[in-house]
Image (cartoon, rainbow, N blue to C red):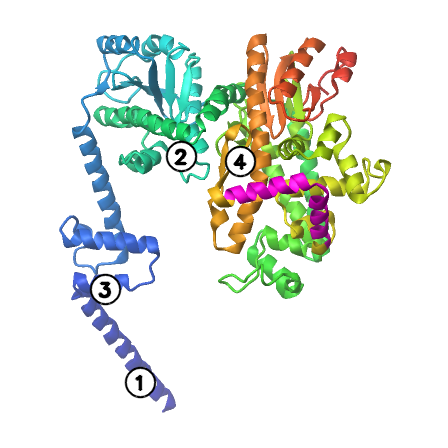
Amino acid sequence: MQLKIQLNMSKQTSSSTALKDASKRKASANETIEEAWVRILSMKNSDADLRKLYEVKGAMAVGIVGREESSAGKRFSKAEALRLYATLQQERINQIRQEMIEQTPDNYWLVTTSDQLDELCKLLDNEMEICFDVETTGTDVYKDFIVGQVISAVKANIHVYIPTKHETDFQQLDHDYVIQKLKPYYENESLGKIAHNAKFDIHMLRNEGVDLQGLVFDTQVACHVLNENEESKALKDLATKYLRIPSLKYSQLFGKLGFHQVPMDLALAYAAKDGDITIKLRDFQRHHLERTHLYEYYMTVENPLIPVVVDMERAGLYLDEKRVKQLASEEKQKLDSLDVEMRESFGVDNEFNFNSTQQLRSLLYDQLKLDKYLNKSDLKRGDSGYYSTDKTALQILANHHDGVAMLLKYRAASKTFGTYFDSMPRQVQSDGRVHGEFNQDTTDTGRFSSREPNLQNLPAVAKTMFVAPPGYVILSGDFSQQEPRILTHASGEPYLTEIYTTGQDLYTMAASKLFKKPPEECGDGSKYRKMMKTGMLAVMYGTGPYTLGKQLGITKEEAQAFIDDFYEEYTCVRDFMNGLVNHAKKHGYIRMLFDRKRRVPLIRSRDYREKARAERQVKNSYVQGSAAIQTKKTMIEVSKLCKQKGNWFPAFSIHDEIGVFVPNTITREEVAEFEAVMLNTVKLNVPNKTDLEISLRWGEGMSVNHWFNNREELTWD
């Protein structure tokens, strides 16, 4: 009987559920669009989705878009609404494309015949400046190729697009014919050239045997000089923001299409506009560079540096693949050994996955209870309610558990292995070299950055993968104590000036004075010299007492006492640093060597942490930024020396080191010429010093004397 009752109740429940489902389906079928929108907009939507949904709702209300035919009879859904947004965007892009074609200005010319090209050349013969741009199949300067060229005659206000390799039945001129016709103009140094991101265009023209000369302005690099905090340096973004000329970026207009696939009339409207707005942007930027007293700096440092960077990138670094395999094997063994030690320290087996955040969090906080060592005011719990496993948290825990310290070492070693030893052979171009990208306009302080690979962070052991080309050696100069010398120069600190002027060791003598110890107790290897070196760098970089304490292995209070004592002893340094901060608070920026600006808007923030960080940036920026300027100006002069020699080539610029490829027949007199450029290009109130090395393999340099005394026996090992 009980079983019967249960069965009947089950049937009743099932019937009730079916009725409810049927009722819901009926309600959905009868749901109006207005009701559907209420339902969709009340869902848990991201801000981005809400913006899209409201845009579609508005477009549907005025009849711009309607429901999908394939969804007729179905309930209107969020998924359909988002698909309609994509359709709406594409229709708008199509409309913009059509408007671009219809509104193409009369001074935008499409050159497709030899007569038209001749007419352009006649215009160029009367110009003092031209703007140039190349349209390509992509952004890889070693694999992509030019499909068309933009030339703007500045005085005539004519903007031309010359297609040569478009996939079209439309008439085009022969590619090589166009290159040869334009080559004399590109290589004419007296004809000024304007471009946006000129480095790329110069590279692409080099691939065609064209050596561009006469670059007078690059609007991308100038943008960085005017405002290193600019969110985007893309030409279209800058034109929209500063010139009030609405401009869509390439990806917005063409998606993944190569420019050679863009229809010719649309290609003209887009490409010729690039030349047009680049000239307008140049005029705008030049005015503001002059107004802010930055024009001379731009014209004497950043602009002439651009072709030097191109030369450096094209020279590349020769990879010794045999050494790479050897190092990769050695590093892999170290990784495997470290992995075993790490697992033993934690007491976990090979099944444990250290890349799993969930597993690692459980190990550190649930099993080992290491959360007790975290500073809860600095490391807040996230939305998940768990402590972090990021680098910041692990660095704190490493002081309390050997396994965590090993994990940090393992992660760093693993990253190095993957970035350099494993992937480097895949970055070799057809010429057997790795061509890294050097960027003069990406860091806030103006220092160089590099990518693919990042040579600025190249570990010492990884440098040995690179060798000089056959018949050449690497001659390099490393500025000695570049930043402390600049600090001494700027502050005028008498005792530091005396140390450098008399050729004594800075850290030894400064430590002797500060700690009241004899110089012989403060020499190399002493704790006093180490503390002074670390402490002085901390002062230059605006490092706080907490971080300095960690660096020196002392308490925060002891570190603060060191900073106070340093400033008490070296009052000119203190006054100079305080002066920088006060100037920034008043004006929002500081001036570095040669009047370059560093803007720090957050120094006026009401947020204490933001303001403190900005004050540290001010101190750091002057020293680092001025050092970068000294390096950049020296690179320009080194490049001139290379061109004078004819067979020397710029190789790299890594922090305060400049390297060139020179013939292995180099003489002592020629080395002295290189040294003179390093020492005398930017003279300070104290003597410069550079440490010279000659090497067959990067990272295994030898003194100049050792090279000349033994070079007959020296070969690659």
CA–CA distance between discs 3 and 2?
41 Å
Judge left or right: residue 622 versus residue 331: left
- In the rendered structure, find residue 233 and report the number of the disc placed on it: 2
523 or 202: nearer the viewer:
523
Residue 651 colored magenta? Answer: no
Would you name the residue on which mark 3 appears?
Answer: 38
Query: Which callout, 3 or 1, points at the residue further toward the start of the chain?
Result: 1
- Density class for disc 1 (Cα within 10 Å; few <14, some 14-19, many ≥20) is few
Which residue occupies 48% across, 49% down? 604
- The residue that label 4 is drawn on is 445
Q: What stretch of residues is rendered in magenta?
A: 558-584
**First along the sequence among labels 4 and 2:** 2
Which of the two discs, 4 and 1, labels the residue nearer the N terminus? 1
Q: Residue furthest bottom?
A: 1
| Kind of element beneath mark 2 | loop
* Residue 321 visible somewhere in the drawing: yes
- Residue 676 percent location from the top left of the image: 65, 16
How many marks do you count on the picture? 4
Residue 601 appears left or right of 646: left
Which numbered disc, 4 or 3, marks the residue that appears first in the sequence? Answer: 3
Residue at which label 1 appears? 8
The amino acid pointed to by label 2 is: Lys
Q: CA distance from mark 4 to mark 2?
A: 16 Å
